[in-house]
Image (tube, rainbow, N blue to C red):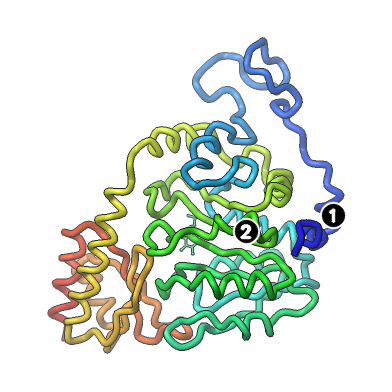
Amino acid sequence: MEINDVLRLVRKNIKALAPYSTARDEYKGALGVFLDANENPFENGYNRYPDPRQAELKSIIAPKKGVAVEQMFIGNGSDEAIDLCFRIFCEPRIDNVVAIAPSYGMYRVSADINDVEVREVQLGEEFSLPVDELLAACDGNTKLMFVCSPNNPSGNIFPVEEIKRLLEGFKGVLVVDEAYIDFASQPSLTTLLGEYPNLVVLQTLSKAYGLAGLRLGLAFASKEIMAIFANVKYPYNINKAGMECAKELLARDVQAEIDVVKSERERVAAALASCPCVKRVFPSDANFLLVQVSAARALYDALIAEQVIVRDRSKVKGCSECLRITIGTPAENDRMLAVVRNFK
Ligand SMILES: *Cc1c(COP(=O)(O)O)cnc(C)c1O
């Protein structure tokens, strides 16, 4: 697809939108007497509105991610970017989206809120990507396709060649959710942005970067799509305190933490695999393991009794008798393992 084909997918009202123009959009200088935004003039650190474009934070994150500032969006968690995809591309009750299943629950919630049909396509054997079925599920009103890679809750990452087949075969926008990419053995798909204008990559500072409490989600796409995101988002979607904290905390090197999580993932996977109640530990490119056991609910309760809380995914189609276990610190993982080892 060409960028103009992608822009044709945008809803008419969004194309025609005259976006809200903030005081800071109309006067961009940093010095002066600011009597243009009805703020309280007495300084307390937060009396001024924050930068609606998040220029400084973007200038820190963009080089880390190997993208241009114009190719990026910062939202109140990835969930804001997911919701914006619906609001920008999907006409309620007319358009539809296709998504893999089992996967992250927010695609459906966001679709339901926006009154947009979701066509879920079950993953294949070993949670493989059903490329042909995904393409077959589309029709002329399919605006978005959601693929989470590495996928939550299965943990596996999909091969780049298969994602490319979707990008080439799909006549809408492919949203690849890379919330867990920093734990993966494969690089991000952001390198494909120049080649595929119908690609939107989602990432987040909530997982590997350790900033879930700040609510900072990232989206990467062509500068044209990112400009539309900027027009549709709330003008001040990211607050000043969050941006300041992020700036300070992004100066840390998180690679050492990521390395511990990855080595713990391999240690925990091997230890779980040798427990009598464990049937299967699925391969993971994320910071969690999907584990199939003999009796998921009973093991979940046994863990809770020892104040170890995991996620029971056993009611999710395709995840029968499965628990999703996040990788914690070595000591936390040992506490979890002690319960699983002794579970009969
Ligand atoms: C955790 C997670 C996110 C992160 O969401 P935020 O709103 O950025 O915290 C996004 N996608 C998936 C698949 C996740 O598991």
Q: Residue at x 45, y 59 (%)?
A: 187
Residue farthest toward the top in the current orientation of the protein: 33
Amino acid type for the residue under numbered disc 1: Asn
Q: Residue at x 19, y 68 (%)?
A: 306
The kind of secondary structure element at disc 1 is helix
Q: Residue at x 78, y 74 (%)?
A: 141
Query: Residue 319 is drawn in which quadrant?
Result: bottom left
Residue identified by numbered label 1 = 13
Q: How far across and down, in percent of the image, does residue 311 sit?
A: 36, 71
Q: Please say if the residues under marks 2 and 1 sit with CB atoms less than 8 Å apart.
A: no
The kind of secondary structure element at disc 2 is strand
Q: Which callout, 2 or 1, points to the residue nearer the camera?
A: 2
Query: Residue 272 is drawn in which quadrant?
Result: bottom left
Circle 2 residues within 10 Å: few <14, some 14–19, many ≥20: many
Vertical order, 234 against 306 (above or below)? above
Residue identified by numbered label 2 = 200
Disc 2 from disc 1: Cα separation: 21 Å
Q: How far across and down, in percent of the image, does residue 219 sit?
A: 58, 52
Q: Is residue 288 left or right of residue 46?
A: left
Q: How far across and down, in percent of the image, does residue 317 sit?
A: 48, 85
Q: Is mark 2 within 8 Å of ligand 1?
A: no
Q: Residue at x 76, y 57 (%)?
A: 3
Circle 1 residues within 10 Å: few <14, some 14–19, many ≥20: few
Q: Is residue 257 left or right of residue 50?
A: left
Image disc number at residue 195:
none
Quadrant of the image for the N terminus? bottom right
Q: Is mark 1 within 8 Å of ligand 1?
A: no
Amino acid type for the residue under numbered disc 2: Val
Q: Is residue 61 left or right of residue 70?
A: left
